[in-house]
Image (cartoon, rainbow, N blue to C red):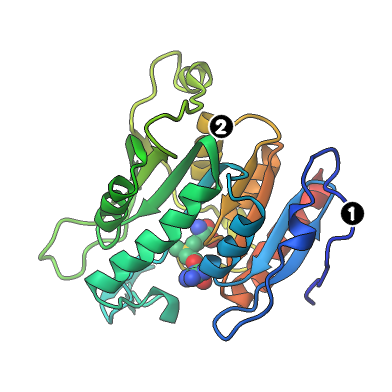
Amino acid sequence: MLEYSLVEEKIHTHEFDLFQSIIASPSQTSFNRLIYTDTQNCVYLYHANCLELMDAIIKKYPKGCFDMIFADPPYFLSNGGITCKNGKMVSVNKGDWDKSQGIELNHQFNLEWLRRCQVLLKKDGTIWVSGTYHVIHSIGFAMQQLGMKMLNEITWLKPNPPPNLSCRYFTHSTETILWAAKNEKSKHIFNYDLMCNENEGKQMKSVWVIKPPTRNEKLHGKHPTQKPVELLDRIIRASTKKDDLILDPFCGSATTGIAALKNGLRFIGIDSNIEYLDKLAIPRIKELNNKF
Ligand SMILES: C[S@@+](CC[C@H](N)C(=O)[O-])C[C@H]1O[C@@H](n2cnc3c(N)ncnc32)[C@H](O)[C@@H]1O
C-alpha cells in the first residue's frame, strides 16, 4: 500500500519547508509525486523522473540545499548480453531504464542530471557517482566539462565475482566510484581521522574490498543493481557530518537512505520506477525505523 502524503509540517528543527512546496505537477514523462514521508527522521521518497524533480527543487533552492549527493545512474548495459548467476547463465538485462540510447545521448543524459546535481549542491558539497566502464568515463568527462573538482576515484573490489562465461575476458570484479566537489573553490569535508581509525590507524586507500549486499539486505527482494549498505556507509562516514541532507536521484531500493538513517542524516530519494520504491525502498526504510 502506498503512502501518499503532502507534507504539512515543517521538517523538525530545520529551516526548510522544501518538500511541501516543491512538488511539481505530473507531466507526460514523470509522476512527480511524493510517495513516502517521514518527518521525524526527515526521509522523503519521490516517484519521479529525477530531471524534472530536480528542476522543481532548483526553482525553490537555486543556490543549492544538499550537503552530499550519491548517484548510481543507469549503466546502459542492458543490451542482450549474458552473465553467470548462482552457476547459471542469465541475461544481464536490468530493465528498460538501463537500455543504451547510443553514446552521444547517454552522455547528454549524464550531463543533464549532473548539471542539476551541481546546482543543488551547497557550495562545499560533494557528489559520489558509481558505475562500470559502460558509463563511468562519460560521468568523469561530464564532471570535468561542468567544472567540478575531482577528489578521488574509488575502486570497489568485489570478492568472489561471478565467473566470466565466455572465457574471452578477465572476470569483471570492480566498479568505480568517482568523488567530486561542486567546483574548484569548494572546501569539501573529508573525515580523515575517522577513516584512519576504521583502517587500523593507517591512511585509507582508494581500493575498497566490500562484499555484495547480504541476505538481510534482500529480505524484501533484490534490486537488480542494489549496492551494499557497507559501501554507502563508508561513503557517508567519509564525507558528511550528522544532520547533513543527502540526495540520491536514482535511489532504487534506497540503500543510500538506509545508510543515511543509520548515521543520523536526512535523506531525499528519487526513482522513476514505482515497484522499486513500493516493494523495496519503503519497506526497507520502515523496517529500519521500527528498529530505532
Ligand atoms: C543503478 S540503479 C540504483 C540502485 C540503487 N543504488 C540501490 O542500491 O538500490 C538506477 C535506478 O535509477 C532509476 N532510474 C532510471 N532512470 C531514472 C530517471 N530518469 N529518474 C529517476 N530514476 C531513474 C531506475 O529505476 C533504477 O532503480
Residue 272 in the image: state x and y as whole percent: 56, 73
State the mark number for residue 237.
Answer: 2
| Residue 274 appears in the picture as rendered | yes
Determine whether the residue tagged by mark 2 lies in a helix, strand or loop.
helix
Q: Residue at x 68, y 39 (%)?
A: 265
The structure residue drawn at horizontal position 69% and vertical position 77%, both measured from the top left corner, is 25
Give x and y (percent) for residue 233.
56, 39
Sequence order check, earlier mark of 2 and 1: 1
Amino acid of disc 2: Arg
The front one of 141 and 85 is 141
Residue 151 location, x and y as percent?
35, 33
Quarter of the picture containing the N terminus is: bottom right
Does the beta carbon of the residue at mark 1 sit less than 8 Å from ligand 1?
no
> For residue 202, what is the image quadrant?
top left
- Is residue 226 in sight in this rendering? no
On the picture, is 205 further left or further right than 117? left
Is residue 222 rendered to the left or right of residue 168? right
Residue at the far top: name it.
201
Quickly name the residue at label 1: 9
User: Which of the 4 image quadrants contains residue 204?
Assistant: top left
Relative to residue 105, is residue 151 depicted above or below? above
The CA distance from mark 2 to mark 1 is 29 Å
Is 5 positioned to the left or the right of 159 in the image? right
